Image (cartoon, grey):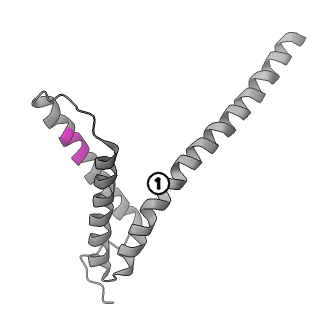
Amino acid sequence: MRRTASTMNHLGLCFACALVTLLAFSVGLVLVARATKREPKPIKPVWAVLIVFAAVFVAGSVCSIAGRDLHILYWWLLGAPLVAVFIPLVVVATNLIMRLIMGALYSGAERFQRRR
């Protein structure tokens, strides 16, 4: 694969550009919603899942076109269900561990206070 001068060679720069683009898009959506005084309506979970998978498909397609490899799209599509399963597991495990640690710290602090 031949690299040109226009490709982003620095990984941090690539992530920074992606984050700035997402932030600008989000701020733009909020400003448009506030300017039009739009009332938010809850969406059905099926539509939310379809929107997320559409975004994953578009992002994977763009990355696979830019990388000139169709396997990148496969990894993006495989990653979406894995993220849907593992993020809640990580959040629950982190919450449980933090509750245990904080409970132990508060218990130790209470015992220390009673001894004084």
- 107 or 115: nearer the viewer: 107
> What residue sits 26% from the left and 65% below the top?
58
Numbered circles on residues, count? 1
> Magenta stretch?
25-29
**Residue where numbered disc 1 is placed:** 84
Q: Is residue 100 above or below residue 107?
A: below
> What residue sits 11% from the left and 30% below the top?
35
Is 109 magenta? The answer is no
Image coordinates of residue 46 in percent, x first then y, are 32, 48
- 11 or 59: nearer the viewer: 59
In this picture, residue 101 sits left or right of residue 59: right
Q: Amino acid at mark 1?
A: Ala
The quarter holding residue 65 reads bottom left
Image coordinates of residue 79 in percent, x first then y, are 45, 65
Image coordinates of residue 22 in percent, x first then y, are 28, 51
Image coordinates of residue 107 in percent, x first then y, are 79, 22
- 63 or 83: nearer the viewer: 83
Identify the main secondary structure in magenta: helix
Q: Is residue 90 above or below residue 79?
A: above
Q: Is residue 72 above or below residue 93?
A: below
